[in-house]
Amino acid sequence: MADKIKVTLNRSVIGSTKGQKAIVKALGISRRGRSRVLPNSDATKGAIKKISHLLTWEEI
């Protein structure tokens, strides 16, 4: 199991719900096309699952 996860926002949050926008902000992703390296934890995986249609991720 990888130690880190690289998350990239591929779709815009325009038209998303307030909750989805809050999750993107909580992950620390500011704009479309930006990436963030996050710890591989259950909380991170849960957030990714909620907005998986907006982003891509890979284990590092």
Image (tube, rainbow, N blue to C red):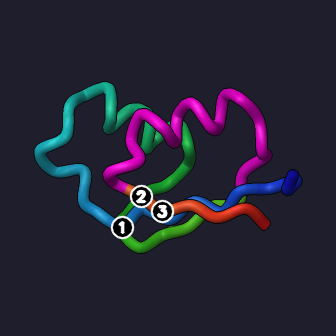
For label 2, the residue is 55
Please tell me how crowded label 2 is: few (under 14), some (14-19), or many (20+) other residues with Cα within 10 Å: some
State which quarter of the image contains the C terminus: bottom right
**Residue at 39% across / 41% down in the picture?**
51
Secondary structure beneath dot 2 equals strand
Residue extent of the magenta highlight: 38-54
| Residue 1 in the figure: left or right of residue 13 | right
Q: Is residue 37 above or below residue 23?
A: below
Q: Quadrant of residue 10?
A: bottom left
The dot on residue 57 is none
Say which quarter of the image contains residue 35: bottom right
Q: Residue at x 32, y 38 (%)?
A: 21
Badge number at residue 10: 1
Residue 50, how many percent across, how many down? 42, 34
Amino acid carrying label 1: it is: Asn
Q: How far separated are the C-alphas under marks 3 and 2?
A: 4 Å
Q: Amino acid at mark 2?
A: Leu
Q: Residue 11 at what x, y percent from top left? A: 28, 62
**CB contact under 8 Å: marks 3 and 2:** yes
